[in-house]
Structures are given as structure tokens and as C-alpha cells.
Image: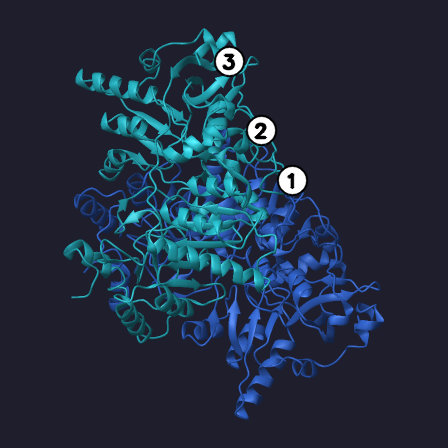
Chain colours: A blue, B cyan
Amino acid sequence: MSLADRVRHPAFLQRVMSAEEAAALIPTGANVGMSGFTGAGYPKALPQAIAARAKAEHAAGKPYKINVWTGASTAPECDGALAEAHALGQRLPFNTDPIARKAINAGEIDFIDMHLSHVAQHAWFGFLGPLHIAVIEVLGVTADGLLIPAAAVGNNKTWLEIADQVILEVNTKPSAKMEGMHDIYYGTAIPPRRVPINMTHADDRIGQPYLRVDPAKVIAVVETHKGDRDNVFATPDDNSNKIASYIIDFLAHEMKAGRLPKEMLPIQSGVGNVANAVLAGLLHGPFENLLGFTEVLQDGMLDLLRAGKMSKASATAISLSKGAYEDFEKNIDFYRERIILRPQEISNHPELVRRLGIIAMNSMIEADIYGNINSTHLMGTGMMNGIGGSGDFARNGYLSFFVTPSVAKNGSISCIVPMVSHVDHTEHDTQIIVTEQGLADLRGLSPRQRAQVIIDRCAHPDFRPQLQDYFDRARAQGPQHTPHILSEALSWHERFVQTGSMHAA
Amino acid sequence: MSLADRVRHPAFLQRVMSAEEAAALIPTGANVGMSGFTGAGYPKALPQAIAARAKAEHAAGKPYKINVWTGASTAPECDGALAEAHALGQRLPFNTDPIARKAINAGEIDFIDMHLSHVAQHAWFGFLGPLHIAVIEVLGVTADGLLIPAAAVGNNKTWLEIADQVILEVNTKPSAKMEGMHDIYYGTAIPPRRVPINMTHADDRIGQPYLRVDPAKVIAVVETHKGDRDNVFATPDDNSNKIASYIIDFLAHEMKAGRLPKEMLPIQSGVGNVANAVLAGLLHGPFENLLGFTEVLQDGMLDLLRAGKMSKASATAISLSKGAYEDFEKNIDFYRERIILRPQEISNHPELVRRLGIIAMNSMIEADIYGNINSTHLMGTGMMNGIGGSGDFARNGYLSFFVTPSVAKNGSISCIVPMVSHVDHTEHDTQIIVTEQGLADLRGLSPRQRAQVIIDRCAHPDFRPQLQDYFDRARAQGPQHTPHILSEALSWHERFVQTGSMHAA
């Protein structure tokens, strides 16, 4: 399919140029809003052209850096290329690229780690400064000048609205038959003019299938022909399967006890192998007519849709492995009826997450014995990826699970520690912690009660006595609501940094 | 006014008995939902009668404890009396009573420190177990059997709905003319049957003025004749006035810059002297037609209403000093038109806080250089009061301020520390930190940028070099997104515990 088939509005065709020409229109220091969410729908040509320009400018002794705001993570052709060229000044709100991660931790990139539901509104409020240019991947332009969104909606609606100028990357590779799958809600506003979001079911469509743009703002249209990053998912291992089975048993138990409605509630599932294992578990579990209300639709949810266990899935992006993507394109008419892609301010909206009663399942780096969760920082200092949408769902959902294997690095790290080295979700927001050892239900428990349950149910046996010893000695210190020995609270992390193991000498 | 004037429905009059007789109806181990929010609208006779019963049972060698759920804090006649009698097993979600605090920290009371917007729904979902008995202060019963709420609505609607049995305390002391001030919303539901809350302005009335109760559940009606706890507010000191002036200047600046709507947005103000100083500052500030959307209406907001600077105020409780209360009762017809008292699940609802664009102002115990906030724990271990509604507002509001004087205990404690000893609000949720030294605007800043701004603007000069030294040495350690020296991160708190001062030797 040629570019002219995809761009059916003459004003846009007049702006067609090469990625290099378009990159020349982006000055150093610009705030650039890019498409892209979890390795889907990111611009593929522009970032590489910008990176090449940055290298040329730097070689000529000139400064060149841009600030990049996205939906969430992108791919090597985007964050990787830009970071490798030292072309990133500020970056928000999420990153998984290893080259960019290194530059973030080195302090070269100013990384702002934000709740994904906050990004669009904070930009619109003006809190992040002006947005100079939007660089948005689309699948085409209709004869009316409307944009057909790609595999990720992310913050594209907002970038297109608030940017001074717009560059479109029209990707002719993905199936144009994705048209109609998206639901772009144009009812948001800035306070005091906000109104209720009129959604009462996870599969309600409340918007329109297209993104709008003022044609006068479009300064370039660039063609690309390239698929999204392939995501690789490991076959769920024993630990993931155990975690999944605890969660499914728990949900069945809660339903039996009347604490979970018989209709089941919509499911949010974070990114990764444990998440996919839980979804795989649901494939053979007792629940029918499931609904998905999540950020990223991954292989596991596609399987549930195909099997008929899940009736509809709402997300802001589709991020699949190669095999799953082939199935997706081949059966796109089937999936178009069952998948709804929304802006991330809607997919992650606190109002909707609370109203719909989402069951949130997110992975973490570590938990402490009082239920505080670290989702972002290795040993308290090194940024991994960012908080993403975990807080949007965990804080406002009906039930919230945080999951991790109980140990990491061949058993040298305990993922249950006396005190987490960084807090992303507080004790007030954590309900259920699950490792391959078991499940700790923290609802209605005081800190001391929580500590004993987490140690007994979730800690690895190799670390359990060491945790119990800490807790016992902390309690023995005297009256404390949350017993801690301040001089030891972070000593497990210190020990790992010094010796390569959290195990006591 | 006699009890018969206040209780205008015969079925309720048939249940009148003494507090002692009513207390005899509450068995040990019962989960009891009491009214009360920030020292207002709590039951006054029953808790003391329960405490007396507990003492008698204990003297007879028998166990007697109940679990008490409220709106928020109560008063010496309630939490104080119950704690003194060792009659509290579990307590949630908030406490300010010193006797109960001591028992909480001793581990005698299992205290669950919850977001105030979560309490009603978690109880309704069944997450907290069954609610056996509700003990609710009301001002009267209408001829139709509807209940006239008192000075605090709190979780009363939910307790009356889900409790097996109900005991009413009819307080004949407060003016019955408060009738009509309340707005009880009966539109909440359990997912998947939730619908949008149809409120678009802070002063919208969306419910009815009365609480409902099934008369068949009412097992006792007890008369009391006693005012709420007097709240004492110090005259704002220099520090409070400075903090207030920074906030007001900042709001004016933001409005000028177009980052705050010209109409101004509704204001939430936490409890205490700094909060009252900010409200006092608004009395002479440039903003007109203010709206309040807060938990607790205190003296400062009453002043704004009286002066005509604030047109309407929405809260879940009125908690005033003696003088302000006299003014409130004297001018109740004026205030009834301007004050709306709602259930706390509505006053603090994430959906509404975000939609209305609340400006949140809350005090804290300490902040760290990266913007994490400790609102609850002294030196990481000792419970002060609880998180209350601060998270409901800070997380979902349009702007969020956290305020504290820069030092405490005569300068021996720095309220800006390398790492907070407990996290209640994460770096992702904090926007603006204010001390008497200045204001740090953290929006759009990376951790390293935040640290420098907080040290420069908010730290006390006596501690600034020590903080800068920590930050410089942490940065020098190597690549870290959030530079910390783990072995020193909590050393300031340790030093205070050991030496009585955070100052370096």
C-alpha cells in the first residue's frame, strides 16, 4: 500500500518529505511530544534522523538536545538512537531502553518518573512548559483530514492538541484495517470545566475512532514502513505459574465469600512474564466473560480473547510478540470487535479505575515487611523503568496485587526486605502481595500484623529467619507502631552493594 | 429542647434508654462503626459507658474489647475514654487522641492507617469484616424517621447501611437549625454497578439533607446534651504567616502565567495552624468568590465565608474553636446557605477531587530532598495521627502543597532530611513544598534537580550545608538516578534518637 493510499487528504500530501528534512525542522532545546507506548506506535524514522542530526551538530561543536515526552516506553530506533546520540535533555514519563537508562542514571538525561494518568493533564495545564512539536505515528489520514491511530494511542490526542507544530509519521506497514479499533475521547477539559466521564462498563465506547489535528499545524509528513518492536515473552516458569495459581485461587475464594461480585470485575495486568502467566492461568480458570481494562494488551490477553474467556479488552496500546502479532493481523476483523484502544488518560483514569472496580496486578522490584512497594529503583538509587501506570491502578482499583519472585540474582537478593530502598506505593495503597512462596492478604491489618503475614507467606525460606530476627529485635526496642531499627533498615541493600549478597555474614 | 422535640417518630422514642443500658448491648469483640470526624459529631455518652463496662468486665477478670471504625478523630470522651479503659482492639482509620496514640504505639491497639476516601468502600466490599453495630450521633429524627446529621457526616451513611444494629445518640445541645445543611449522596454502589457522580462544581448539592436508617435495626436511642470538643488554634505565628504568603504569591503568579484558571479553583486545607494561616492570608489576598472543597471546615474557612471572600464551602465536618462555634450557631441561617456537609467518601472522592481541580494544602512531618513526604511517623516508627485525607487530595488535586516549618524541637530536628523515615506521599505525588524559608516548585523536575531546589529554598540555613554535603557526596558515588548513601540515608533520625539532635557532631 502506497503513501497516497494511506494519506487521503491533499493538504497532508503536500507536506510529505524525508525524515532528514523533517528532523531539520526540530531545533535544539525543543520540547517534543512523541507517540509510543510500551514499544508500540512510536515514531521510527524521525528519532533516527534526529539522532543523526545531533551527532552532526555535536561533531561541529554545536549543542543539540531535545526534550522528549511520550506515552510510555518506545524502542531502540527511538529512545535508543536518541540516547546513543546524546540528544535527550529531559525525558518523561517512562523508559525501558538500556542506553537511555544508563544516561538517566548518569544524570545526563533529566528523567521525570510520572504516573501515566497525570502526564496529559500536567502538559495541558502548562506544568511541563510549552510543547513545541508533536511527532506522531499514524496509519493514515482520512479524506476528511482525520488521523487513523496506530497500535498505541498514549498521549497522542493531547500532543496533537497542544503542540505548536506537528510532524506525522505515516506507517504503511501495519494493517490499515486497524481503523475503527480506537476510541478517542474528546470530552476532557481543564478545571473548572470538567464533567463526568460517561463510562460505566470497561467496554463502553465513548469517543470516536480518529485523532484530530489542525492541518495548519502539520509541518511534515514522513513515510515509514516498519513494524513495532517485537516483544519477547519467556514461557512462564514455575515461579510465575505458582504466583498465577495463588491469585486465581484467591479470586475464586473472594467470589465465594461474597467479597468479589459474581460477574467478576475488569482486569488490569502489568507488563511482563508474571503478568502473562496470570493471564495464561485465567485461560483455564473458572471465570467467564472477563473484561480487560488495562494499559497494554499483551499476548496473554489476546489468548483470552481468542479463547472466548474474555469478551472485550480495553487498553491504550497493543504490544505483542511476533507470533501473536501475526495472529492479530490475520484475525483483525475478529479482534477489532473485541479490542478498544483509548488515550492513556482514559485507560488509566482514577475516576474510571475506581468506578469500574478494576482488579490490578502489577509486578514490583521489592516489598518490605510493612507492605511498602518499590517498583522503580535498584538498591534505592538506580532507575529501572519508572512507575508507569501501576499507581493509577493500585491506588484506585477494587483489589490490588503486587507480585514478584521472592528472590532475585540466583537467590542473593531477597525481594522481601526490612525496609524498601525506595517507595512507589505506600502501605496505604497495598492490599495483596504474592510471591512463589504464597500470598499475603494485608487488608485490615496493622503494620505488625502485616509484617508477620508477609514474612510467613511471601519471604523465601532462605531469608525468612533473617527477616523474623529483624522484626523481633525491632519490636523489642520499645513502643513503635511500625517497628524498625533505623541503623539496620537499609543494611540488606548496603550488604548487597558491598558483598553481592543480602545474606547475613 | 427536650428529646421528644428532637425525636419525632414513635418507633425511635420506644427505644430510648440510658447509655449504660445501651452499652450492655455491645458484646466484646464487636466491630463498631462510630460517628466522628476531627473532633466533631462523635458519640459522647456511649463510649464512656462502654469504657465503664470494659473496666468492670476487666475487674471481674473477663475480656472486653471492641473494634472501632470512625470517620476520623474523635475526642477524649470517645477515643480517650475507650483507650484508657483498654477497650480498643482494632481502630481505624485515624486518631489524634494521646492515650489511644500511646496504646497504638505500644502495639496494644491494632491501628489501620487508611486513606479516608477508602474506608466506606472497603467496609462495604467486606474487606474489613462485618460491621455489627453503628453508634451514630444525630441531632434528631424527623416524623418520617429520617435522621438529622450532626456536625460531622463522616462514614455515617455507610455505617447505618451495613451495620446489623444501630444505636443513636441524639444530641440536644447543638442547634437543630443545622437541619438542611447536609447533602447525603445515596448514589454510590459496589462495582460493577457504579455510575458517574454527577457533581461538576464544588457547591453542587447532589443528595438529600437526611441520613436513612432501617428503624428495625435501631436497638437503642440515647440522649446526650453536650457540645463537640473545643478546638484550640494558636494565633498564626511568623513561620505560618510566611508559609501562607509564599503560597498566596505563588497562586497569584500561576494565575498570571495562565497555569491556574482565572476563576480560581476550589481549596482543600488540612488541619492545623499553618492551614488556618493560609486561609487567613486568603482573607486579605487577591482572590474572590473562592470555593472550599475540603474535609474539615475550620475557623479560617468560616472567616472567609463571613467576609464574603469564599462563596460556598463543602466539607464532611465542622470543627471550630469555641468563639467560632458561637458565631456559627448565632449566624446559622447565613452559614446554612453557604456550607454543605457530605459523606467523607464524597468530600474526599478521587473522582471529584480530580474533576473539580482541587488545590490541596496539607501539613507534613518531614520531606526529603527528593520530594517524598512523611505525614505520619515520628522518626520512622512512632505513629502520630495517620494519613487522613492528605493522600486523597494530594494525589488527585490540580495543585498540591505540602507545608511544614523547616525545623522542629527548637531547631534540633530538620524537617528536610536526606531520606524520609516513612513515606506517605511519594515523589510522584508531590508538587510543591513550602517552609518558612521558601517554596520549592518540583513540577517537571528530575530527582537531582528537585534536591537542589529543596535544599536551596526550603531547608533551614542551619541544616543547609549538611544537606548539601550529603547530596554532593551521594552524587560523587557514581551513576544514580536518585543519589543516596544508604548507610547515611537515615542517620539523621538515628542521631536524633541517640543525641536529641539531627545536627552533625
Q: Which of the 4 quarters of the picture holds residue A209? A: bottom right
Q: Is residue B319 above or below residue A106?
A: above
Residue ID for mark 2: B186
Residue B183 vs residue A387: left or right? right
Sequence-wise first label, 2 or 3: 2
Residue kind at label 2, given as amino acid type: Tyr
Of residues B176 and A406, the one nearer the viewer is: B176
Crowdedness near tag 3: few (<14), some (14–19) or many (≥20) residues, C-alpha within 10 Å: some
Of residues A397 and B348, the one nearer the viewer is: B348
Residue B283: which disc?
none
Residues under labels 2 and 3: Cα distance?
Answer: 18 Å
Crowdedness near tag 2: few (<14), some (14–19) or many (≥20) residues, C-alpha within 10 Å: some
Quadrant of the snapshot with the C terminus of chain A = bottom left
Same subunit: marks 3 and 1: no
Q: Is residue B330 above or below residue B363?
A: above
Residue ID for mark 1: A200
Measured as percent of width and height from the top left, residue A59 is found at: 53, 92
Q: Which of the 4 quarters of the picture holds residue A27? A: bottom right
What's the chain of the residue with tag 3? B
From the image, state whether disc 3 or disc 1 is nearer to you. 3
Of residues B421 and A242, the one nearer the viewer is: B421
Residue kind at label 1, given as amino acid type: Thr
Residue ID for mark 3: B215
Q: Is residue B464 above or below residue B123?
A: below
Residue kind at label 3, given as amino acid type: Pro
Q: Is residue B21 above or below residue B425?
A: above
What's the chain of the residue with tag 2? B
* Residue drawn at (74%, 80%) of the image: A17
